[in-house]
Image (cartoon, helix red, strand yellow):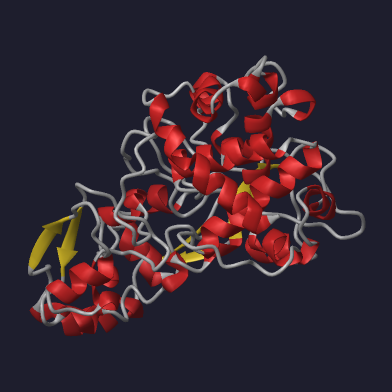
Amino acid sequence: MAVVGSIALSLTTAPAHAAPGSAEPRTTPDRAVSGIRPHAMKSAVAGAAVVAAADQNTYTVQAGDTVSAIASRFGVRTADLLALNNLGWKSIIYPGQVLTLVGGAAAAPAAPAAAPAPAASYTIQHGDTVSAIAKRHGVSTQAMLAANGLGWSSIIYPGQTLAIPGSAAPAAAPTPAPAPVTAPAPAVGGSYTIIAGDTISAIAKRHGVSTDAVLGANGLDRSSIIYPGQTIAIPIAAVAAAAPATPAIPGLDAEQVANAQLIVRVGRELGVPDRGIAIALGTAMQESWIRNLDWGDRDSLGLFQQRPSTGWGTEAEVRDPVRAIKAFYGGASDPNGSRTRGLLDIAGWQSMSFADAAQAVQISAYPERYAQWEAPAHAWLAALG
């Protein structure tokens, strides 16, 4: 067990929801720009909690538990268990925490009983946004999000099916009001698995964030205890806050700008030439829209859709944005060593075309698609400095 000096710091185990949704091929950035994560589409929190099969009304979390496993064990829907305990799909539970399995929370949703199911559904097309779909069907955007268990920062994509709430659906908005679905998203940019000798303060310093930011992102305090094998969330928002004010860049939202700043910052620290940083920016746009995705084609994840199965690291490692960026650049600071080949490891990459250099690292099924981001990438770099 690792102890933080005189202050022991610890974390719990599993995220409330860790199952990535299916995704389009990783090099196809055709998306419906609205920001709705695919895995969140799978169910809507709209209805009373299902009574647990067992007689007990509460459960004390044990090491290794996940919300979905607890729900299955007691015959409760995962969505209902989250709602009963004011948790979101990305919330973190910890050993010793007491979860409510049934109770008063079930009475509140009784009002929407007149419309227990969505009135209709809609299959997303290229160019759709949740707000536009909601307006087209005469419902509020909030009701649309609530009916599908989504948040304002989620991502939607063509081919997905959204539930269209009926006239009574807006009344159900308070049920999924645990907007924690969106709350953790902006704060957490990656994760880290604790090893012997680690302390929260040392981990925070290594990732360029404050100790308090790491504690807050994981629901910890200065009396908590951490131990080897635990996975903790690393808040990227704190990294962005330490940087100069986020510039407005046409075509990029705040999340994309923050990630682009990180790509530039790491590149500068490693001494990567401007053209190499531009290639990294363009590659990230093609692969993930410069978002730290928790889903992708097969097991592809993160900013560069790196695959654990091909040696790029564990799922947590490829979703650690700083580590993923360093792995893309490669060279002497490559966290993967010689297991993978980054841009700086490609002989003659400086003389290659923009698309060929990106393809040499990514090995994509659609290598020609990187070329479309060459001009925008250089423009982003000029704006970010």
Q: Position of residue 324 (x, y in %)?
A: 62, 37
Q: Is residue 156 above or below residue 345?
A: below
Work out whether 211 lies above or below 291: below
Residue 315 seen in render:
yes
Counting from the top left corner in percent of width and height, residue 97 is at: 56, 62
Identify which residue, 277 or 147, lies in the foreground.
277
User: Which quarter of the rendered picture does the N terminus lie within?
Assistant: top right
Q: Which residue is at the far right?
A: 6
Q: Residue at x 66, y 34 (%)?
A: 276
Tell me what residue is drawn at x 37 percent, y 30 percent. Answer: 298
The residue depicted at 17 percent of the width and 80 percent of the height is: 112
Residue at 69% of width from left, 70% of height from top?
245
**Quadrant in the picture for residue 75:** bottom left
Is 41 drawn above or below residue 228 in the view shown? below
- The percent position of residue 14, horizontal first and vertical second, equals 53, 49
Using the image as rendered, state which of residue 322 and residue 232 is in the foreground.
Answer: 322
**Residue 144 in the figure: left or right of residue 364:** left
